[in-house]
Structure formats: structure tokens, C-alpha cells
Amino acid sequence: MTSALRKECDSIRKELAATGTEDAKVRHRLGALVNAIRKEPNKYGQGGVEQLARALGFDKTLLYRHAKVAECWSSSELSELLRRKSVTGLPISFSHLQLLVTVTTPKKRDEYVKTVLAEGLSVRDLKRRLNPAAVKASRKKSSQPDAEHALRGLQTTLEIWTDRVDLLEAEVLPTLGSAPPSLELRSKYEQALAQQQAFVERVNKLGAQIGAWLASGAEGAPAEAQNDANADEHATAAE
């Protein structure tokens, strides 16, 4: 290992020890170093990526994936991305960015970033958006693919809603004991309350439809069991 590579390796090792292996900025720095090693073999030595992987205990393939992210976003661009929060209150993850490197143009990548933040898409959801053909193919292989996919989406959405309601309660409830709002603020709160009520009505309607669907399945099971019992009786009589 060259002195230049050893210096970079020691520096990154300290950062990893302080922030952990999932820190987006450290992973980006690793990717940028991989790109530098490939561009400057005289400085970092032949087989520098392999040496870096062994020294840090990383899989070489993972380092190359980090490198692709570093090619698409500079360090300053990454910092700007991480300052933007999604509807879940969290920034986009490095795993999201690893998927987005497959998008060829910066403009299109930025559109997907906005979608991830606006809709709170999980990495799995983003993967489906990026490769819908593969999703359709996987659905054909499953006996109940649509129901399974919908369940995962429902569970993820409920988790997001629960987190957001927790935040809203923490922000809104303490203000309710304060002085009455001004006329302008009251009007805005009334609009927000109307939106909330419309939202709750839609959620309740969806819940009722899911309940009816589940009930239809529950009612069908005894009927099938009764048919089986009748078949057994006929078989016994025939004997």
C-alpha cells in the first residue's frame, strides 16, 4: 500500500469508527477515493481498490457501488441533498442514491429525488418505480401478487402516517391551550381541519372496503368446509 493510500485509509477508518458504516458522507468519501485510485494508479498503486477493501473489511463490489454514487453527486451536492427532508422527516438515504445511479441524466435523477422526498418512498418502492417491468414479471409468478404488494404498501404507509401524527401531536397540541387565534389564522386552521376530515373519510372508506373484502373471505371458508362435509356424507352413503 502506498503512503498516499495508507493516509486516506487511516483517515476514513477514523471516520467510520466515529460515525458508523452507514454514514452517507463517509460512504460517499469512500466512493470518491475509489474513483481517485482508479484515475491515479501511480499515486495509489496498482490494485489499490482491493487493498482498500481488505484494509477496511469491505466487499470490493460495495466500494464500486459507492464510487458510482460519487460520480453522480459531488460532496457538496450530497450535503445539499441530506439537508432536504422528506414527508417522513428524514433525508434521502444512500441506498436510494445507489439505485438512482442507474438513471442516466442528472435532471431525471433530480426528479426521482423530489419524488422520494415528496412521497416518502422506501428503497423498495423506488426500485419498483425504476423497474416496473421487473415488478410486473414478479407479480405473474405469485399466486396473490397484487394483494401482497398492496399489503406491504399499506404497512409502510401506516408506519409513515403514525410517525407524522406523532410529530403533529407534539407540535399542535401544546398550542391549543394558548390564546384564541386571529381571524386569519382561524380561517387557515378551519381549512386544514376540513382537509383532515376529508382525509379521514377516505381512510375510513378504504378501511371499510378492506374489512368487507376480509369478511367475504371469512364467510367463504365455512361454505367450503360445508361442501367438503356434504361430499364426505355422500361418499359414506355410497359405501
Image: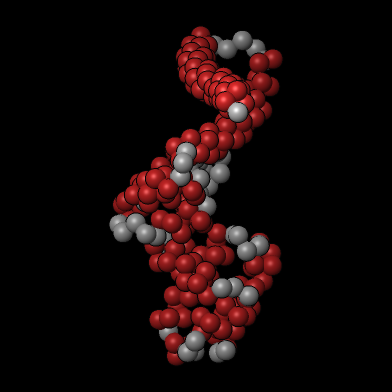
Which residue is at the front of the view, 9 or 197?
197
Give residue 238's quadrant in the image: top right
Give residue 215's position: percent from left, percent from top: 56, 20
Q: Residue at x 52, y 75 (%)?
A: 60
Could you say which is closer to the camera, residue 2 or residue 139? 139
The residue positioned 61% from the left and 10% from the top of the image is: 180
Q: Is residue 190 left or right of residue 229?
A: left
Identify the residue at image location x=46%, y=81%. Answer: 37
Residue at image position (32%, 51%) is: 108
* Residue 68 position (above or below residue 186): below
Question: Can you say which quadrant of the picture contains the N terminus?
Answer: bottom right
Among the 4 quarters of the image, the one containing residue 20: bottom right
Asked if residue 154 lies left or right of residue 73, the reply is: right
Horizontal and vertical percent for residue 125? Answer: 46, 45
Colour option used: secondary structure
The image position of residue 120, as x and y in percent, is 49, 40
Q: Does residue 203 appear in the picture of this structure? A: no
- Badge count: 0
